[in-house]
């Protein structure tokens, strides 16, 4: 059962007794819709998508950090992973663009 259908039945503060009472009242309604239980395969696919989403978020954060650091040295890179992967190797090879200890 979806939580948004139980919420209107809650009368007091959140606790186990109030939650159980609200669930019982919601289940007794004739027009109640129930959420189907996900299969193991569905849960696996969702877990894989969630993990990928986390990796993409971390990659984007790292790319933005690199762009910000390079921006402090006057090196501007357009937004997007593709622009960083194209320009970063050349920037790292060219030692005149940053201090000696920056690349070490």
Image (cartoon, rainbow, N blue to C red):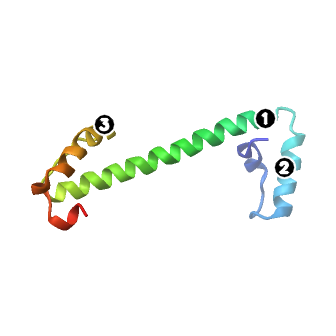
Pick the residue in front: 82 or 68: 82
Callout 2 crowding tier (Cα within 10 Å): few <14, some 14–19, many ≥20: some
Q: Which residue is mark 2?
A: 23
Of tags 1 and 2, which is closer to the observer? 1
- Residue 41 lies left or right of residue 56; in this view the side is right
Q: Circle 1 — which element?
A: loop
Q: Which residue is mark 1?
A: 39
Of tags 1 and 3, which is closer to the observer? 3
Q: Residue at x 17, y 59 (%)?
A: 72
Pick the residue in front: 30 or 101: 101
Residue 34's place in the image compared with 62, above or below, is above
First in sequence, mark 2 or 3: give its number: 2
Instruction: Kindly check if marks 1 and 2 are in contact, taking CB atoms under 8 A apart as contact.
Output: no
Residue 99 image-quadrant placement? bottom left
Q: Residue at x 86, y 62 (%)?
A: 17
Pick the residue in front: 103 or 59: 103
- Residue 22 lies left or right of residue 57; in this view the side is right
Instruction: Name the quadrant of the C terminus.
Output: bottom left
Q: Which residue is mark 3?
A: 82
Of tags 2 and 3, which is closer to the observer? 3
Q: Disc number at residue 27?
A: none
Callout 1 crowding tier (Cα within 10 Å): few <14, some 14–19, many ≥20: few
Q: Residue at x 38, y 52 (%)?
A: 61
Q: Residue at x 77, y 47 (%)?
A: 6
Q: Circle 2 — which element?
A: helix
First in sequence, mark 1 or 3: give its number: 1
First in sequence, mark 1 or 2: give its number: 2
């Amino acid at each position: 059962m979806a939580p948004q259908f139980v919420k209107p039945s809650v009368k007091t503060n959140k606790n186990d007794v109030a939650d159980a009472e609200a669930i019982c009242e919601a289940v007794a309604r004739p027009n109640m819709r129930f959420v189907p239980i996900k299969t193991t395969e569905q849960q696996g696919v969702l877990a894989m998508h969630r993990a990928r989403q986390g990796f993409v978020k971390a990659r984007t954060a790292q790319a933005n950090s690199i762009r910000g650091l390079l921006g402090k040295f006057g090196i501007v890179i357009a937004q997007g992973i593709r622009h960083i992967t194209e320009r970063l190797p050349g920037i790292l090879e060219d030692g005149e663009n940053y201090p000696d200890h920056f690349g070490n």
